[in-house]
Amino acid sequence: MARFFITGSSDGLGSLTAQRLVAQGHQVVLHARNPERARDAASACPGAKTVLVADLSSLDEIKRLAVEANALGPYDAILHNAGVFLRSSGAQAPPGNSGSLPTTFTVNTLAPYLLTCLMGKPKRLVYVSSSMHTGGQPNVGGRGASDLAASNYSDTKLHNAMFAKAFARCWPDVGCYSVDPGWVATNMGGPSATGRIEDGVDSFVMLVLGQGQDRWTNGGYFANSREQRSSAVTDDENLQEQLLAELAKISGVKVPE
């Protein structure tokens, strides 16, 4: 039996992945952004170990989540699935350490960075990216923290793909991967999505279980359960380092040795 932690697992891909893993006899810790969503998560996946509650648009709550999740670990894999699709000028984060940081940036980029830095190292780290990362910009390289924080959805999905490569270099003993689940009919994807949600779940399950890890590139990008090429920007090690440095400056948390 393996143990997994999945952020954003009250519905959609996160919930379906958790259900598949539990059905296979594994232990899964779920996450939801509020108590109501936690009840939804527990109802959809009654075999899960527990549901942790934290709003990932708040730095305080992200840090608390890391403490609570660590207490239930260690994990074979952590799936950074939580994400929001908002324009950069949309809703602001609620009161807390995050102040006026935009929700899209805080949830999609800063939360997985902080959880990666603050939680114990698992065997595998999986970051949910998107094909839309190819249209994103890293917003680092002397542009300043305010430009990074203003990142839109495509930018944050580029960051997620960069995380896999950056942390693979930092921690070569940890399998680090990013994954595009496709455009599927979830609350985020909407009813018009043309992809099969089962294909996204298949990719997630394959990666968290490490089914074929000996053949994968550490830092690799996956879609439809196959390793594929990500944007050339993701391979730029200088940009990777600048991204981690900017996030450390914004959050006050550096990547541990």
Image (cartoon, rainbow, N blue to C red):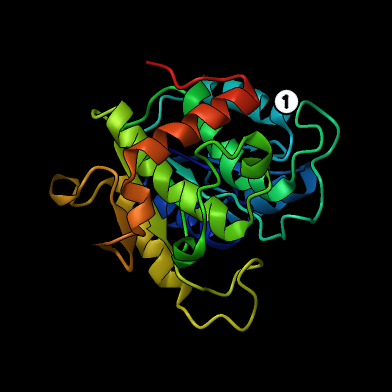
Using the image, determine if residue 213 lies above or below residue 134: above
User: Outermost residue, right direction?
Assistant: 95
Q: Nearer the viewer, residue 156 or 210?
A: 156
> Image quadrant of residue 142?
top right
**Quadrant for the N terminus in the image:** top left
Q: How far across and how far down the image is residue 137, in percent?
A: 52, 54
**Is residue 7 toward the left or the right of residue 36 in the image?**
left
**Quadrant for the C terminus in the image:** top left
Is residue 203 among the parts visible in the rendering? yes
Q: How far across and how far down the image is residue 68, in percent?
A: 60, 24
**Is residue 119 toward the left or the right of residue 31 in the image?**
left
How would you rate the neighbour count of disc 1 (Cα within 10 Å): few for under 14, some for 14-19, many for 20 or more? some
User: Outermost residue, top direction?
Assistant: 257
Q: Residue at x 55, y 54 (%)?
A: 155
Using the image, determine if residue 6 lies above or below residue 91: above
Q: How far across and how far down the image is residue 109, in percent?
A: 57, 43
Residue type, mark 1 in image: Asp
Is residue 68 among the parts visible in the rendering? no
Q: Nearer the viewer, residue 58 or 151?
A: 151
Q: How far across and how far down the image is residue 80, in percent?
A: 50, 44
For the image, the number of numbered tags is 1
Q: Residue at x 80, y 56 (%)?
A: 90
**Is residue 177 toward the left or the right of residue 213 in the image?**
right
Using the image, determine if residue 251 lies above or below residue 107: above
User: Outermost residue, front direction?
Assistant: 142
Q: Give the residue pinned by disc 1.
A: 60
Q: Secondary structure at mark 1?
A: helix
Q: Residue at x 37, y 50 (%)?
A: 234
